[in-house]
Amino acid sequence: MINRRDALFGAAAAATWLSGLRAAAAADEIVIGAIYPMSGASAQIGVDARHALETAVDIVNAVHDLDLPCAKTAGIASLGGAKIRLVIADHQADPQKGRAEAERLITQEKVVAILGSFHSSVSATVSATCERYGVPFVAADSSSPSLHRKGLKFFFRPAAHDEFFSTAMFDFLDAQKAAGAKVESVALFYEDTIFGTDSSNVQRKLAGERGYKIAADVKYRANSPSLTAEVQQLKSADADVLLPSSYTTDALLLVKTMAELGYKPKNMLAQAAGFSEKAVFDAVGDKLEGLVSRASFALDLAPKRKSIGVVNELYKARAGRDINDNTSRLFTACLTLCDAIDRAGSTDGAKIRDALAATKIPGDRTIMPWRGIEFGPDGQNMLCDPVLIQYLGGKFVTVFPQAVAAAKPKWPMNG
């Protein structure tokens, strides 16, 4: 664990140096960095991230009649209408590459803050680097609970982490059980990086507390060339609910292998990631009818909130697809950061950090189904209520909690 006093001492020296560099930067431009997988197996994640962040930057830099932070004025009002410029770096799903790119963005591109980074393993190294330089890091879509527990002063996460998500998932299972459904056992299936292992630790704990039998506990190597042995274990266990925590490539391989081996889970309740990606449903969506996934976003709430529909259309014009769980979190994180820069009235890292810590954005001024955005002392937003969405008829619909549900869940998904 990083010692807070040591981290602050090192950050102070780096921040002093950086402030001199930024003082010479053009007054009409504010540079924000983002670190995402722009190449390799997860490249589509990076492409979608770019579209989401550019949509948010457009909201900030132009004038939009939307009740969203920084939307009604052109640029950052407190800095004379200065425009946001986005610089995106490629971490290639490699934590050490992420660390190097963070240093480059800070020292060469002179970014005032960094957004990232989808893979929790990369967000871990990037956030540590940002801490050392006194530069805010906003974890847009990395959900490992360990990320906000490292004593970092410059770390902020607007969206939920996997303990929030998994609690909502087990609340949903409890609700199905209370309604008379057979939900007695679960099977854990998770990749071996920080995302999968942290997710499984939370789910293992909740299963024990809620009285669900763990019929299978299967850990696999991320980006494995074969999942045959692992799927055979899942098939033999025949749990009432399969709980996968997998990125896109592994999610595709899992579903294809299940089909090859004739394994049809009674229910699948996914930790989003690959199971929120269009590429997966384009390829194997016919085998995922009824899949339930945790989410931060509910597109079907658009009729109740103008900004959701407008932002979706702006994003869709760039990406050719609807905004989803991952990209909605990126959009929201970027606006949250820009709102802090506006309130700070400065590009100084420490002042932006203090403004982030003081954030109070009500839920109805976001596109998310949250109570709001307010960070605790550890940088985690405590008002980011998750939802559960189900893939029905070729699209996702919100099915839980009942207060925001657009449809009743199909349960079981197979049977």
Image (tube, rainbow, N blue to C red):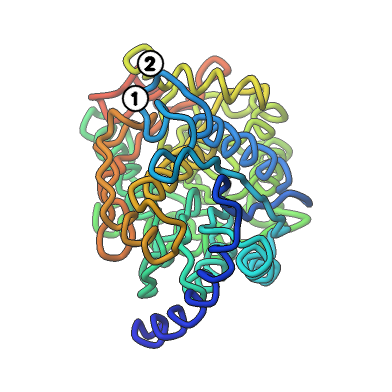
State the quadrant of the N terminus: bottom left
Q: Is 191 rendered above or below residue 288?
A: below
Depth check, front residue: 297 or 59: 59
- Identify residue for label 2: 306
At mark 2, the secondary structure is helix
Q: Give the side of residue 127 with respect to residue 285, left or right.
A: left
Mark with earlier residue (1, 2): 1
Choose between 14 and 95: the one closer to the eye. 14
- Say whether marks 1 and 2 touch (CB < 8 Å): yes
Q: Quadrant of residue 148?
A: bottom left
Q: Nearer the viewer, residue 142 or 279?
A: 142
Residue drawn where x is 49% and y is 60% of the image: 217
Q: Which residue is mark 1?
A: 67
- Identify the residue at image location x=45%, y=27%: 390
The amino acid on which the numbered mark 1 sits, given as a three-letter code, is: Asp
Relative image position of residue 132 (x, y in whole percent): 50, 77
Q: Is residue 9 left or right of residue 393?
A: left
> Residue 229 in the image: x percent, y percent?
68, 57
Mark 1 is surrounded, within 10 Å at the Cα level, by few (under 14), some (14 to 19) or many (20 or more) other residues, namely: some
